[in-house]
Image: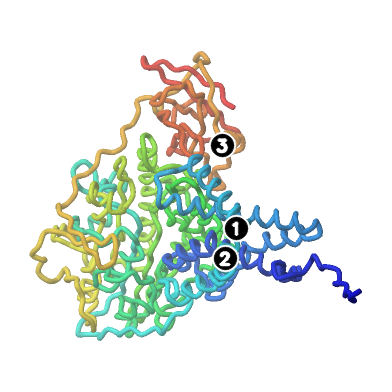
Amino acid sequence: MAERTLAPPRDHTAGPDRRERPPWWRSELARLAEVTALVGLVVTQPLLDVLGRSPDFFLFHRASRGDVLLLVALIALAPTVPFALLGALAVPAGRLIRAAVHTTFVGLLLAALAVQVGRHVTPLRGVPLLVVAGVAGAAGAAAHRRWRAPRRVLRVAAAGPLVFVGLFLFASPASAVVLPRGEGGAAGIGGAGAHPPVVMIVLDELPLVSLLGPDGRIDAERYPNFAALAAGSTWYPNATGVSGWTPYALPAMLTGRYPEQGAAPHYSQYPDNLFTALGGLYRIKAEESITRLCPPSRCEQATTPEQGLGVLVRESGKLMGRIAAPVDSRVDPEDSYRERTAAEAGLDAAEPVPDDPKFRWDTLDDNQPARFTSFLAGLRPDPRPTLHFLHLLMPHSPWAYLPSGAHYAAPEDLPNDGTGWVDLARARHLAQLGYTDRLIGETLRTLRATGLYDKALVVVTADHGVSFRRDWQGRGMDAIEHAANEVAWVPMFVKEPGQRAGRVDDRNWEHVDLLPTIADETHMRVPWQMDGRSAEAAPRERADKRFYDRPGQPVTITGGVPAPLPPPAADPLVGTRVGNVPVGGSATVANRDAFDAVDPARGGLPALVWGTVPDDVPDGTRLAVAVNGTVGAVAPVVPPDAGGRRFAAFLPDDRLFAAGANRLDLYRVGDDGALRRLTLS
């Protein structure tokens, strides 16, 4: 009998078709790489892309290089941390549970990515987009679970966040803020003649038509200080900005050149500008907002303190919310550029207190913008020729001031366009313009008190306007095409040294003419070629205008001095007293509690009321809003906005309010004019 050799027992855990399971830590690293790749696509790339194209965001918030680098590190790393921690907590639960948790993460992140992609490539919005994105996320998670190829792709893509950070730091417009490359800049050459002090105020988002009365001149009743400025200076009513976006418009004003590239509004990108042209001879005191065109070597730094990393993180979080939302955002990113008050910045208010009893600086001085406070304090005679420069984000949104100087709260996402909303936006804009008029008055009073007014070249203008035309609200190309008179035409006043009588010059002024004009008035020779033409030269022959929605892509706009717009119509009910009327319905006022303890001395008033009414109240129904028995506003009921609001009423007259508890009433106005009081909740 032949000898037999017994085969060893079969190892069911090994073989050519089975591999040894990798150590747990290698599996965790692979999963972390996959999550990192998806987080990079969902959070890091879109956020750094938007911030990289918005250097003004960092300039306005006065971010240091360290602040920006820390923010970028947080954006690249922090969103992955919660997924890593939750995954680690799932490890002790076993392999199957850990795998299910990871698959869930992948599905959620893919769904979030699908929302962003779908919003750009499909017309879907809201719930339909969320449903489609959820299906896409589930399908992607299933594919990730079933096949190896998606996992391998994601692991390779884990390097994505590093690539996105590199692009931000070295290739985006914002890189000039983080890694400025020299100051450069050619100094102007002083010529024969006097070199007067220069006081220059650039306001923001102010259309000329907002200042005009029915006769086409500055409305002296509503804006007495702008009217006083016009009465002693040269007014250029046919003046236009060159762009609706400050990062393009302001460099054009200060360089004398049309916008040709999408560069950061930074001295390293625009080394030749007003500050360098005057900086060889002039002392420079500059208060910039969303630009940093004045090189540190030429410019005294602003006295308002840095705003820090916390503000950057908070505003970046809001931006991420808009990027990730399944609906289009109607919020202008520049609406976060709110002027800080003197109290918020820890500055003392400007002294001395003005005499105007209607402008209560004695109790509202903390409401004065910090940048304006610092500028006003610096308006003092100096033996050296001095440029006093202020770019103030007034009357730019967010609108928060009444003409008296009192401030009020409003939802950040309140619509500015559509039935009812656009009229509300314009009314709030005009109220804040009334406040801005007070600031101009303060400047003129200070200049006269210090003796600078007669000696100085005083320039007051705005970088661009804004449209309040229904369906074309804003300052982009749609607004330019339908309401160029509101977007392009801006106030432009130049008071020469010693000038006392006002005059009007209707030449075709474009804002590239500003630097050549200042150079001639100060007897300085600018050592670079400019596109603009000084007001001391012959007017340009052409009548059309150059406007840039995008740098290097000029569009031509036509038209002369815009006709005045009619003021918002006053409802006859405003100002009337309301007695006892029957109850006829209900309403919800979101900020009703604000009326329980009003303290005008602290500078705040509940001047905006918003809320909703039952669905059976038809759109277009008029609501009268009364404070302490006097109707202060009448507003229409409109379709619900994204926040569910169906009405918002603006109460610009602060005489309606009293210290302490105030009674708020809403009335439904019938077709016959009869009132029915609404029960408030």
The residue under the point 28% across, 66% down is 551
Residue 343 visible somewhere in the drawing: no
Q: Quadrant of residue 185?
A: bottom left
Tell me the CA gap for discs 1 and 2: 10 Å
Q: Tell me the crowding category of disc 1: few under 14, some 14 to 19, or many 20 or more residues within 10 angstroms, Cα based.
A: some
Q: Secondary structure at mark 1?
A: helix
Q: Which mark is residue 144?
A: 1
Quarter holding the C terminus? top right
Q: Quadrant of residue 260?
A: bottom left
Mark 3 or mark 1, which is nearer the start of the sequence? 1
Q: Residue 396, relative to residue 666: is it above or below?
A: below
Tell me the residue that label 3 is attached to: 591
Q: Quadrant of residue 91?
A: bottom right
Q: Residue 502, relative to residue 413: is it above or below?
A: below
Q: Secondary structure at mark 3?
A: loop
Query: Percent position (x, y) of residue 500?
Result: 21, 62
Query: Percent position (x, y) of residue 578?
Result: 46, 20
Q: Going by the image, does 101 lie left or right of 317?
A: right
Q: Secondary structure at mark 2?
A: helix
Q: Tell me the crowding category of disc 3: few under 14, some 14 to 19, or many 20 or more residues within 10 angstroms, Cα based.
A: some
Quarter holding the N terminus? bottom right
Q: How many marks?
A: 3
The colour mode here is rainbow
Mark 2 or mark 3, which is nearer the start of the sequence? 2
Tell me the CA gap for discs 3 and 2: 48 Å
Residue 32 visible somewhere in the drawing: yes
**Dots 1 and 2: beta carbons under 8 Å?**
yes
Tell me the residue that label 2 is attached to: 154
Tell me the CA gap for discs 1 and 3: 48 Å
Query: Could you tell me the amino acid type at mark 1?
Result: His
